[in-house]
Image (spheres, rainbow, N blue to C red):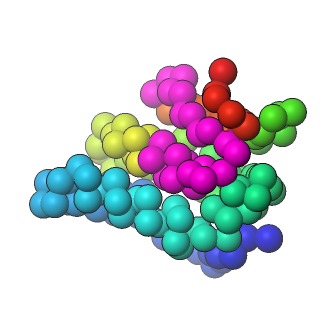
Amino acid sequence: MLRYRSEGEVHKDFHGLTCATLHYLIDNYGEDAMRQVVRNTAQKVYRTMHEALKNGDTAELEEYWAYYLDRECGKFAVEKLPDGVKLTVTECPALRHLVKLEQKPDHLMCEATRIFNEALAEGSPYTAELKSTGTFSCEQILRKGAVK
């Protein structure tokens, strides 16, 4: 069960604001500060998900991916693997939203997602990997042990 489940209208510029915040942190405090903020978000705000992963349970992460990507009209599939879980995003709502704002898709968002996933998996039996598969697509994989 998700600890936090946003309801009501989706914030119209969440992704633009997130991207701008990541750049602000880097520009004013450095890349390490941005990484620390993302890491703390993964491990403290999403504490229950992080703790579940540390216990070998991917259910809350799977629910998080499906709930938020569905809510934001992303095109995706969540697949249970014998040794973990895989999210295939074929149409990223965050990067598409940046284009609607007349910006280029900013892959700092992808880097922040990679940092977030690695922080979630830290101390767990899982290793996180994010593979870009196109301008608006990726695979996010958590596997026990090393990602293949």
x, y (%) of residue 59?
Answer: 80, 56
Quarter of the image for residue 39 reads: bottom left
x, y (%) of residue 7?
Answer: 66, 77
Quarter of the image for residue 110 reads: top left
Tell me if 44 is positioned left or right of 67 in this view. Answer: left
x, y (%) of residue 90?
Answer: 63, 32
Tell me if 136 is positioned left or right of 52 in this view. Answer: left
Report whether residue 58 is seen: yes
Q: Residue at x 64, y 28 (%)?
A: 147
Q: In this view, does 96 lie above or below 10?
A: above
Q: Residue at x 51, y 53 (%)?
A: 119
| Magenta span | 113-135
Residue placed farthest to the left in the image? 28
Mark count? 0
Q: Which residue is drawn at 68% across and 34% down?
A: 145
Q: In this view, does 124 lie above or below 43?
A: above
x, y (%) of residue 12?
Answer: 46, 66
Tell me if 71 is positioned left or right of 1 in this view. Answer: left
Q: Say which quadrant the N terminus sits in.
A: bottom right
Residue 49 in the magenta stretch? The answer is no
Q: Residue at x 53, y 73 (%)?
A: 45
Q: Say which quadrant the C terminus sits in.
A: top right
Residue 115 in the magenta stretch? The answer is yes
Q: 134 or 122, which lies in front?
A: 122
Q: 136 or 130, which lies in front?
A: 130
Q: In this view, does 24 lie above or below 121?
A: below
Q: Is residue 3 above or below residue 101?
A: below
Q: 106 or 132, which lies in front?
A: 132
Report whether residue 20 is seen: no
